[in-house]
Amino acid sequence: MQTLRRTVAILTFPAIAYLGASCERTDTPTGARSPARALLLSNDPTTRWVNDDDPNGPPYSPPGTSCNNPGYQTVQDAVDHAADGDRINVCPGTYIEQVTIPSGTDNIQLRSVGHWQAVIQAPPIMTDPKAIVRVNGAHNVTILAFTITGPGGSGCNSLRYGVRVDETGSADILGNHITQIRDNPFSGCQNG
């Protein structure tokens, strides 16, 4: 009986501590920010807009305001101009390019405006590591609702990855269609 009481006490204490901690009030009044929080948010993230079929044509005015007034024609151009925490909205269209999100651009959100309507397609000639989208050391990247597709532009070893995360990077890759990661024509190289 003594063992049962000890077991119940050991299991009950963490639950009570958890409930007590979750009931503590830590929020600030509506609309008020602490001075430290206001300082941290002084560089609020920017929303950047990409459209390869700008109805107004060039020149582009970064960061853009919508699909009808984009700031960039390519996804990579928007990534190159992005800062930590920026959101990149990609309008429906086909973007034939490789996209690399480098280290130092953490918390980037790369989002297709229409679910699977923004297509990032492998170009005919790819550079190493032959990934269509690469997160190269950036942390907490989100890639959401794209179609990422091949095939590669030639025979053996023309395309290796739809999405590659490397150099200690991290990413949430959510709700994407990643298709045809292969050579064209099919080869016996066993890559992709």
Image (cartoon, rainbow, N blue to C red):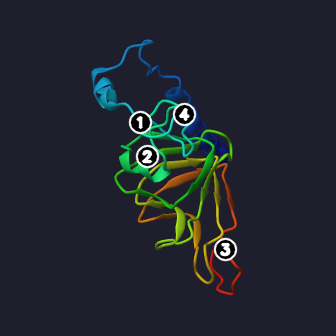
Lower sequence index among marks 3 and 2: 2
Q: Position of residue 192 (x, y in %)?
A: 63, 74
Q: Is residue 168 above or below residue 155?
A: above
Asked which secondary structure carries label 4, the reply is helix
Amino acid on which the number 3 mark rests in the picture: Arg
Label 1, label 3: how many angstroms apart (C-alpha)?
34 Å
Asked which secondary structure carries label 1, the reply is loop
Q: Give me the disc on residue 18.
A: 4
Amino acid on which the number 1 mark rests in the picture: Pro
Label 4, label 1: how many angstroms apart (C-alpha)?
44 Å
Residue depicted at x 43% and y 46%: 78
For label 3, the residue is 182
Label 3, label 2: how many angstroms apart (C-alpha)?
27 Å
Q: Are marks 1 and 3 in contact (CB under 8 Å)?
A: no
Q: Position of residue 117 (x, y in %)?
A: 67, 45
Quadrant of residue 185 in the image? Answer: bottom right
Farthest front residue? 57
Between circles 1 and 3, the one closer to the viewer is 1
